[in-house]
Image: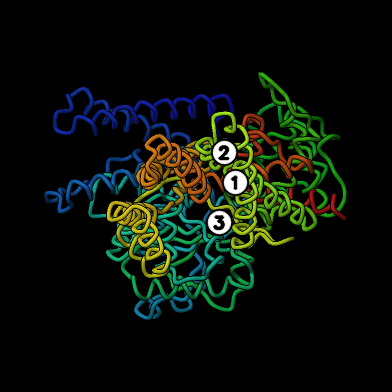
Amino acid sequence: MLDQETIAKQLDLLAAHRRTLAVYLRQQAELGMLAPPGVVNGIAETRAEIQRIKGALREGGVPVEDEQGDEAQTIAFTSPSRLSPQEQRNRLAMLAKVKTIWIEGLLEQSLAKELRIALDLTEQPDAVDLPLNALVQELRRPPRELPTGTLIIKVFDQMSGALLILGAPGAGKTTLLLELARDLIARAEQDEGLPIPVVFNLSSWAEKRRPLKDWLIDELNQRYAVPSKVAQHWVDTDAILPLLDGLDEVAAEHRGDCVEAINLYRQEHGLVPLAVCSRIADYEALATKLRLQGAIIVQPLTQPQVDAYLERAGEKLAGVQAALRDDAELGELLETPLMLSIVTLAYAGKSSAEVQAVGTPEERRRHLFDAYIQAMFKRRSEEINYTPQQTTSCLSWLAAQMVRHSQTVFYIERIQPDWLPQQQRRYYSYAVRFLSRLIFGLFGALTFGLIGTQFGKPGDVLGGVLFFGLFGAVIGALYGALSSGLSGEQAGSVENINVTETLHWSWSDLVLVVRLKPRFVLLAWLIGGLIGGLSGALGSILLVGLIGGLSGTEREVKIKPNQGIHLSARSWLAYTLLIGVGSGLLGTLLGAQFGVPFGGFVFGLGVGLMTGLNAGLNYGSRAVMLHYTLRWFLYRNGSLPFRDRSLVPFLDYCTERIFLRKVGGGYIFVHRLLMEHFAGLERAKAQ
């Protein structure tokens, strides 16, 4: 057996060789056939060293995982690309996007990365509903333990690309799925004939419970910003390899329907590879099984695995080692990589007495998570602006809301009014109605005040401005009240906040407006014709076409926190200027019919302001107003900081404390178990 110092040195050397190999492989990928002999020979020599070190460690009883790239891969020569240049760009962009979000953003930042334990996997044939052609071979086949260190990509290949991954909470299921995604991405980058691996979280499927094909198209469009036509084509042509995480996160009453939807998709797209992850207890409670080629169960960590890890950790976990010798029940908590990593961070440097806890397993687990939270607050930081009480309170509220709304990733711009307590929703509704009246009243006063400058003698201008301004304020307030009523803002009722991140114009949107609102189009044409003749009629129709063909959408792949609201504000400004200028020019034309050129300009300016600002409310500014009104209420009840300059640093602070991980423009708890622990704190506070 090797001593701990030798093992540590060999592992460090192995890691160094793998980093060197990664550099060589990157150079070879960039240079292709032009790669110099030094790069080619360096790859071969480094791989030989890696195999030598792994062999020595394994002979010494140290389990070492194989990694993608340790051995040379056989690359088949492919024919020239059958994809168009645009299709190639779309494919490469999607591969890069999945890698950035899930591999670099989550897998390489996860707690599991801190561990160097090869998970034990057991093949479980009876966990799936095997297809008929495999039934004869698999009938009565018992569970089979796979060799230690077996790569998940090899298991996936052995299961013909149709795999179910099961395990206890924190066992490493999602980590395995992301490792599979990493390896499949590497393959897809080398061979464009392979489908694009994409990670989907099944928790959102229960919102509409649509056929899986339609849901995949929506998710590609909404979560990954893939144009609908491209997403439709990819799914129809089996160009997407779905990696479905979180079957257990689907609401229990809809989980069986979700399995049926996956099975139906498999029936229609049987040749497409697919993988699904689920907690084993939730899956075994289902009456229907998934129709996949095979299943594996991630086994609990064994005592030798835990002991070996603690030995390698050295003195900093000596207290945990001592506590394990006196407390067998503590060892039962350390059956998963998650709990072992939590123990490593929570109990580092603590004595045996500080580690030990009493009570039921659930109480002991809460003690462990509480210790982890307290330990994370003691991590060094350049600046600490939040007390542990504030941080715990806000994270508990956030976790409870995410659990309640079946969300995995938290985006600031997706906070909705139903996150407020029931009583506060009524006050929020009143505030929104008041702001609508106020904003439209100000718009009306400004518009009609400008028009009022053109009436009366020079000495009466102020009176004209006041009179018409007051008249416009009343009209605007009434219009605001009417628009609030039409949008469903009755007392106690609230509307969802829909951000407008991008604007686009299309004939289909224009045709839809003409079909649904023909009277509006005809009225605009008649008013323009009566006041401005042919020019006015044509101008009115042009303005209607401009407005009717525009629509706003949400781009759901976020790069920066609260990006949706910031882009909505930009869309608001762009749309206000566009419609304001168009309607202002038309208003100038119509005002000139009164025979006063300057008056026509002022009339046009007033019309442009009123129309542009009003239109902006429908395309961006309304979302901004509703969002920050809601955020103010959440700030007042102590749920979250108000301003982005306060909320984003707070979330980043929680990321530094290893409570959250940053994924693009969103935030995710480091593990669902930690999120559920924080949510439990919120429930206990409410009782």
Q: Is residue 111 above or below residue 222?
A: above
Near-viewer residue (71 or 376): 376
The answer to whether 429 appears left or right of 161 in the picture is right
Establish if 542 lies above or below 113. below
Residue 687 placed where, x, y %? 87, 55
Mark closer to the observer (2, 3):
2
Indicate the quadrant containing the N terminus: top left, top right, bottom left or bottom right: top right
Q: Is residue 301 visible?
A: no
655 lies left or right of 244: right
CA distance for labels 1 and 3: 69 Å
The numbered mark at residue 449 is 2
- Residue sitting at x 61%, y 41%: 469
Q: Nearer the viewer, residue 398 or 475?
A: 475
Contact, mark 2 vs mark 1 (Cβ under 8 Å): yes
**Which is more N-terminal, label 3 or label 2?**
3
- Residue, disc 1: 472
Q: Disc 2 marks which amino acid? A: Gly
Callout 1 environment at 10 Å: few (<14), some (14 to 19), or many (20+)?
many
In the image, what residue occupies the spot 79% across and 49% down?
Answer: 682
Q: Which residue is mark 3?
A: 298
Examine the image and state in which quarter residue 235 appears: bottom left
**Could you tell me how far apart the alpha carbons at marks 2 and 1 are, in whole angstroms?**
7 Å
Q: Residue at x 54, y 77 (%)?
A: 288
Instruction: Give the mark nearer the N terminus: 2 vs 1.
Output: 2
Taking the view exactly as shown, the residue that stands out farthest to the left is: 80
* Residue 132 vertical position relative to residue 585 in the rendered view, above or below: below
| Residue 239 at x, y percent in the picture | 30, 59
Is 275 situated above or below 399? below
Residue type at mark 1: give it. Gly
Q: Nearer the viewer, residue 208 or 507?
A: 507
Q: Residue at 23% of width from left, 54% of height from top?
A: 193
Residue 632: x %, y % from top left: 71, 41
